[in-house]
Image (cartoon, grey):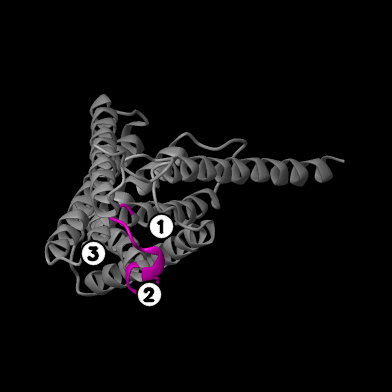
Amino acid sequence: MALFWYPLTVILSTIVVYLSLALCAVGIALLVREYDLYLREPVGLLFLAVLLGAAAMWAATLTQVFIIRSLVGSSLLLNDPFLAALAGTTEELGKLAVVAFFAVCLRRWFNEPLDGLVYGSFAGIGTALIESVWVLSGEQLASLPPQEPVRLAGHVIMGGIGGFGMGLLTFRTRRAFIAIVLSYFGAAVLHTLWDVVAFSAANHYQRTTTIRPIHSLLAITLMFAGMIAYRWLVAYGARLTRAKLQVCDLATKRCPPF
């Protein structure tokens, strides 16, 4: 009887963990969807962005493994800051590539300044989901670890920041390319710093089985800074969208006579 109940409990706990992860992803997706105020993107395309984000994460991981193996084969020592920078640049480049796909191949639905942030955010959901599955697949858990919703939110914020500049291509101006570079650089730096803190915290915990307050403070500070930057870009993108569409009222999409 015990042989029957043991695998059953493992199966049920696994279902609970992954169902909780999926619900967190849906909840964050609905929040991001609220920022798409004007020309709303089709749900199917947002789901495609999630799938492409997962594929981009897979490609970024293969790229990281290839670079690490090549450098190790050359007898080079790789420190944590380098690994953090490698992860930050490749993973954010993958999300940006997803946004670029929509901007180039599906321009009919990439038609307002906020679209870069929206598609980048949904690509971040896919990136976070596949990363969480990799992490959780090696563990037997009864509930979703608290860091997984944070992982989801972090990738969404960084994906939105990194993809924002691509949305300015809808203005057909050369300044958009500067915005693309700056947005990507900001997301990559934020991601790198986040991983530096995470690596340092993990190393300290392995040595002492304790968590230093400074690591928690730095992680909170970085996440808070990312949230502020993300929300500012949403507001700025909304202003640009209103200017492009020349609308004031969300319900009628028109401006009242002055």
What is the C-alpha distance between the residues marked 1 and 2? 16 Å
Q: Amino acid at mark 1?
A: Ala
Residue located 30% across and 62% down the image: 96
Q: Vertical placement of 48 versus 114: above or below?
A: below
Residue 140 visible within the image: no
243 falls in the magenta region: no
Circle 1 sits in a helix, a strand or a loop, which is it?
A: helix
Q: Earlier in the sequence, mark 3 or mark 1?
A: 1
111 falls in the magenta region: yes
**Residue 173 horizontal side relative to residue 44, left or right:** left
Q: Earlier in the sequence, mark 2 or mark 3?
A: 2
User: Residue under circle 3?
Assistant: 169
**Residue 26 horizontal side relative to residue 222, left or right:** right
Q: Vertical placement of 216 versus 1: above or below?
A: above
Tell me, for residue 105, which label it has, or none: 2
Q: List x then y, in percent, for residue 82.
A: 19, 57
User: Residue under circle 1?
Assistant: 123
Circle 3 sits in a helix, a strand or a loop, which is it?
A: helix
State the extent of the magenta-drawn residues as a range.
103-114
Q: Amino acid at mark 3?
A: Leu
Disc 1, disc 2: CB below 8 Å? no
Tell me, for residue 147, which label it has, or none: none
**Residue 186 horizontal side relative to residue 116, left or right:** left
Q: Would you identify the image quadrant in which residue 228 lies?
A: top left
Quarter occupied by the C terminus: top left
